[in-house]
Image (cartoon, rainbow, N blue to C red):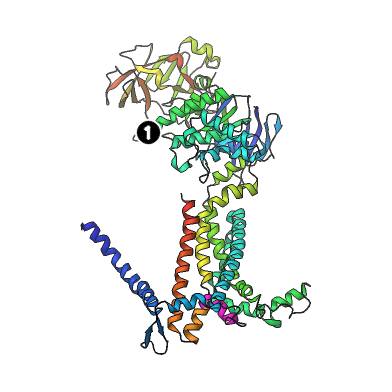
Amino acid sequence: MAEISLNKINKIYGDNFHAIHDLTFDIKDGEFMVFVGPSGCGKSTALRMIAGLESISSGELRIGGRIVNDVDPKDRDIAMVFQSYALYPHKTVRENIAFPLLMAGLDKAEIAARVEAAARTLELTPHLDRKPAHLSGGQRQRVAMGRAIVRQPAAFLMDEPLSNLDAKLRVQMRAEIASLQRNLKVTTIYVTHDQVEAMTMGDRVAVLKGGVLQQVDTPQNLYSRPVNMFVAAFIGSPSMNLYEATLDGTELKLGSNTFNIPASVFAQRPSLNGAIRRHLVVGIRPEHMNDATLHPASAEIKAHVKLVEALGSEAMVHLVIDAPWIDAGDPDAASDIGHERTAVARFSPKSSVRADDNARVAIAAEELHFFDPQTRKSLW
Amino acid sequence: MSSENRFVLGMLMPAALFLGLLVAYPICLLIYNSLFAVKTIAPDVREWVGLANYVNALTSPRIAESAARTIKYSVFALAFEFLFGFCAALLFNAIADKSRLHRTVFALPLMVPPIVAGLLWRFLLIGNIGILNYGLVAIGLIRDPGDIQWLSDQDLVIYSVAFADIWLTTSFVALVSYAGLTNIPKDLIEAARIDGANALRRFWHVTLPMMRPVIAVVVIVRGVDAAKTFDLIWIQTQGGPAHSSEVFSMNIYQRMVRYGDLGSASASATLFLFVMILLAALAYWKIWRSAHD
């Protein structure tokens, strides 16, 4: 068990590509930390630096209080689960799981006992004498987990361990890994590009973009108090809708629509007080918009319905709002249908809106987010 | 027969005819000839002798000696080609992309015809005018250039003639091995690093087992190649002195061309062919198949 501490970690490759900028945060002993971000954000690089597979250009990395910048991976007391699982194809499941113990020079009886115990935990006992090629994807994933837990390391590092599984198995393994980690209480760093995985598994989540740490916080805080537009849009699915707006006193002008902002928002965000025709970016989560004919609210806007996706429990309604649309800067975000930028709203399934309708949309104004259009930071 | 099957047969036909004409027919003729006493100068005068040619081949001390020599030569050449080639491949792999120039230079001997390589090495090694011995004198390993008779010492010559083979084909082993090394997933090596394996153990537990199919190819291709070497040794020694560098293929040639004994040469050649097929099959089963299990 150990805490991991990163202090101004930088990674600059030979061709002057600056992959990681001044990464600084602490991971507490036994904590489940998730690194999340779009592709190319540096999350895997950061993990590989902690593992010792990539050199650290500058900064200080500590595991269990000890500076390990120049310590060999095998001496860092960590175990890693790879996206490809990296199982040794010529070894049986038993030999795969036993490998780190064999390398550590444990005696045969001890190795056998620990392999058996790990196999029991992961329900791999019947497969111990098979080769990885004869296992299913989920079983291979378990073997990779087994190889990690068997050595009882100070920390687990997991690099997108579920991305090769199908959707159903992924949900199941997600829960299993989370509960395994809770039982073992081993400090864990988990890299994923999937914000749902990040939100459901992590004690805390570090959001990265372009090699820069955006925010480290609990999943709930990332959702309700994002520090900037990127985090606001990246966390939550579908994404937060961002539009240019003007705030004048308590009145918000969103395109041709105007509605009042409740006093509770100004209490929470004092910097918005006394605004005179202030340009800002307003963020509306899909779940904070609803069909005004079913759920009347004091704040209401008009929008044109482009498309309705009925999911049974809810309806995803794509709306055209006549205000300038703002890009949150997520390179992985799916581009919209057609060239018209739409907002997505999560309507109740009872809503009767259809494509091409002009709908009245109720806004939960007390749940709105506000950002500075220049710095892209949240306004508090 | 379905039209699909007819199409398959039709597509196979040219290749099958070609193989039949150029492979099956000569082999059948070889086996047929081996059952007769027949001279090269008068191939139509033949006398049925049954398996007598085979009995002679299996009991002749000269053939037994040449067979033993072939094994010595092949094992010696293959061992060093493999050692040097594999080490070179590991070096190329260690310097990764920067190895392009080294690999190109290293591959140059592959383009040298064996006859030229043999001649070249003959001049390097021969008697007291060979450059190699002068070099050894210069660094003080021997006192006189005539001290080591590379090509005329009867105990040494079968190994000396293998130098050219090693020089010529180490690069083949290196290139094939390098290709194999680049195919090993990086994740596996990294996982082994994290699992606590040092470089030597990573090599033993990951690299070497992953290279098994490549090693099988090298051993089969190069082993069979070395066992049937002819030109490389012929240009250096013509099998001498006193047959002490006469390998099996050379023995067959001598009997066929010098002694004109078509029947007994065919019998030896048939035996040679079957042993080669057996060896290749064995290597295939033992190394290739078990690696793909």
Q: Dividing the picture into quarters, in which one does residue B80 lie?
A: bottom right
In this picture, residue B237 sits left or right of residue B130: left
Give the magenta-colored segment's residue range. B228-249
Q: Nearer the viewer, residue B217 or A154?
A: B217
Q: Is B261 located above or below residue A351 in the figure? A: below
Q: Dividing the picture into quarters, in which one does residue A167 lie?
A: top left
Q: Judge whether residue B159 can be spotted in this image.
A: yes
Q: Amino acid at mark 1?
A: Asp
In this picture, residue B260 sits left or right of residue A42: left
Q: Residue at x 79, y 77 (%)?
A: B143
Q: Nearer the viewer, residue A180 or B25?
A: B25
Q: Residue at x 58, y 25 (%)?
A: A184
Please provide percent x and percent y for residue A335.
39, 35
Q: Is A118 located above or below residue B287 in the figure? A: above
Chain letter of the residue beneath label 1 in the structure image: A
Q: Is A187 located above or below residue A17 in the figure? A: above
For the N terminus of chain B, the image quarter is bottom left
Q: Nearer the viewer, residue A116 or A78?
A: A116
Please provide percent x and percent y for residue B49.
40, 81
Q: Which residue is mark 1?
A: A336
Q: Residues within 10 Å of mark 1 (few under 14, many from 20)?
A: few
